[in-house]
């Protein structure tokens, strides 16, 4: 008999209003362990709002978000991150004056027992060394180890995006949310990114949600795709199902 695993994430009629606008409207979906789950839709469809709901940046107006079967909708963003849901942002958010290595180490400190303060004052030298080593390994993984001492603001855009992913991975998440990870990348970089996302999924046993406008990347990478339009989920399925869905073609793909 085939084992059916329970979902890592489950949205139950998740709704978010901004005044009269329903940015996310009674959205239901679940994401299985190890899936790469894509979220697409026209500008303003509610994709980032949905990410903000999953990560606790904003509370839902109604509905629930479950993580491993437990409701997380009322938790603060740092509590949700500590539980194992990490993210990157559409507009890169790095500590621009800190080095590449420090950007990753700071995230990692949040996960270690003695915490940020002790790490900074060096009270836990052993742990500091471990944190540094782990951060360097992550930089190696994203191909940035030779930029470790550079201030992050000096990196080109594509490298800043990869640094953001390294920083999110430093939280040792179970779930990783990527908001337009390929934005601003050329075709070759997009290809590499796609391969990289698969690699980190396999290596860290991640479940990945990603928002992405580049349709070929989404279709080639994702196991399943959800399509939002005006806050509503208009389709969900594997890439072939979504590509051939009439409502999706009308709302989104037709304009590509
Ligand atoms: N804080 C806010 N206050 C008011 N309206 C908001 C807020 N955040 C988002 N919205 C509105 O909610 C709708 C959904 O926005 P959202 O950014 O989630 O869309 P999106 O699908 O991520 O778009 P894009 O692809 O352009 O990033 C839009 O109409 C937007 O203007």
Image (spheres, helix red, strand yellow):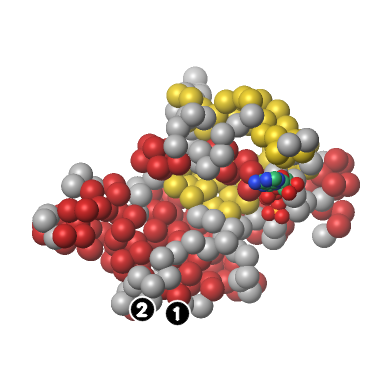
Residue 52's spot in the image, x, y percent?
57, 43
Seen as rendered, the residue at the extreme front is: 19
Q: CA distance from mark 1 to mark 2?
A: 7 Å
**Corner quadrant of residue 216:** bottom right
| Drawn side of residue 213 relative to residue 201, left or right | right
Image quadrant occupied by the C terminus:
bottom right
Q: Is mark 1 within 8 Å of ligand 1?
A: no
Say whether residue 234 is left or right of residue 122.
right
Q: Position of 116 compared to 67: left or right? A: left
Task: Reply above or below: 60 against 131.
Answer: above
Q: Residues within 10 Å of mark 1 (few under 14, many from 20)?
A: some
Residue occupying the point 31% across, 77% down: 149
Label 2 CB-ligand 1 distance < 8 A: no
Decide if residue 26 is on the left or right side of residue 172.
Answer: right
Q: Residues within 10 Å of mark 2 (few under 14, many from 20)?
A: some
Viewer-proximal residue among 23 and 159: 23
Q: Position of residue 76 (x, y in %)?
A: 44, 37
In the displayed structure, would residue 102 be above or below residue 109?
Answer: below
The location of residue 48, given as percent across then percent down, is 63, 48
Q: Quadrant of residue 12?
A: top right
Determine contact: label 1, label 2, CB under 8 Å.
yes
Q: Is residue 152 visible?
A: yes
Residue 44 disc label: none
Tell which of 121 and 1 is nearer to you. 121
The image's mark for residue 154 is 1
> At 87% from the left edge and 41% from the top edge, which residue is drawn?
246
> In the displayed structure, would residue 145 be above or below residue 53?
below
Q: Which residue is mark 2?
A: 150
User: Where 101 sits versus 43, above or below?
Assistant: below
Residue at position x 54%, y 73% from top? 157
| Residue 35 seen | no
Secondary structure at badge 2 equals loop
């Amino acid at each position: 008999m085939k084992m059916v695993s329970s979902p890592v994430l489950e949205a139950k009629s998740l709704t978010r209003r901004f005044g009269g606008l329903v940015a996310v409207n009674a959205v239901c979906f679940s994401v299985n362990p190890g899936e790469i789950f894509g979220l697409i839709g026209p500008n303003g469809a509610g994709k980032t709002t949905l990410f903000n709901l999953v990560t606790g940046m904003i509370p839902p107006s109604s509905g629930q978000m479950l993580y491993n079967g437990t409701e997380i909708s009322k938790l603060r963003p740092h509590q949700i991150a500590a539980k194992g849901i990490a993210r990157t942002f559409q507009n890169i958010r790095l500590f621009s004056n800190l080095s590449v290595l420090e950007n990753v180490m700071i995230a990692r400190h949040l996960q270690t027992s003695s915490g940020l303060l002790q790490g900074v004052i060096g009270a836990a030298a052993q742990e500091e060394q471990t944190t540094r080593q782990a951060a360097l390994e992550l930089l190696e993984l994203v191909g940035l180890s030779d930029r470790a001492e550079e201030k992050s603001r000096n990196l080109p855009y594509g490298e800043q995006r990869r640094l953001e992913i390294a920083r999110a991975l430093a939280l040792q998440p179970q779930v990783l949310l990527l908001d337009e990870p390929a934005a601003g990348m050329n075709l070759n970089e997009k290809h590499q990114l796609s391969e990289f996302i698969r690699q980190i999924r396999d290596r860290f046993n991640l479940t990945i949600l990603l928002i992405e406008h580049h349709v070929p990347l989404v279709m080639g990478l994702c196991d399943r795709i959800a399509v939002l339009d005006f806050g509503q989920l208009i389709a969900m399925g594997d890439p072939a199902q979504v590509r051939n869905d009439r409502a999706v073609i009308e709302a989104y793909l037709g304009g590509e």
